[in-house]
Image (cartoon, grey):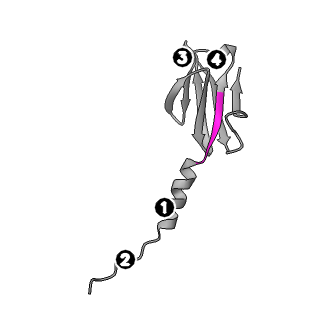
């Protein structure tokens, strides 16, 4: 008779995966930010104007002008309430 497999609880891993799929939207734009470099949490994500779907939670947004001057450095909290039609906005 084979030994039973060790008991494992698959629910915690599933719960973790579910949390990483929850997203909210951020919009970065405005006349003075056109062409500015946008980073979230230290990672380059594109040039303004742009819209991003980010995981729910806190994020550091840094927007750098074409002349390498930081024009926005802001910690934001993204929630599922920020939809594509009603995103959190950073406009200038």
Residue position marked by numbered label 3 in the rendering:
68
Residue position marked by numbered label 4 in the rendering:
33
Residue position marked by numbered label 2 in the rendering:
6
Give the CA separation, mark 3 to mark 1: 41 Å
Give the CA separation, mark 3 to mark 4: 12 Å
Q: Which residues are magenta?
A: 22-27
Mark 3 is surrounded, within 10 Å at the Cα level, by few (under 14), some (14 to 19) or many (20 or more) other residues, namely few
Disc 2 + disc 4, Cβ < 8 Å: no
Residue position marked by numbered label 1 in the rendering:
13
Residue 15 in the image: state x and y as whole percent.
54, 60
Give the CA separation, mark 3 to mark 2: 55 Å
Q: Can you tell which quarter of the image residue 26 is in?
A: top right
**Above or below, 14 relative to 29:** below
Disc 2 + disc 1, Cβ < 8 Å: no
Give the CA separation, mark 2 to mark 1: 16 Å
Disc 1 + disc 4, Cβ < 8 Å: no
Give the CA separation, mark 2 to mark 4: 56 Å
């Amino acid at each position: 008779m084979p030994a039973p497999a060790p008991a494992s609880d698959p629910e915690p891993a599933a719960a973790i995966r579910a949390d990483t799929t929850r997203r909210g939207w951020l919009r970065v734009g405005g006349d003075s930010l056109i062409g500015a470099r946008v980073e979230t949490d230290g990672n380059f994500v594109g040039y303004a104007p742009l819209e991003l779907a980010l995981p729910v939670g806190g994020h550091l947004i840094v927007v750098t002008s074409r002349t390498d001057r930081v024009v926005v450095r802001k910690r934001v909290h993204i929630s599922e309430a920020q939809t594509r039609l009603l995103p959190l906005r950073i406009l200038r």
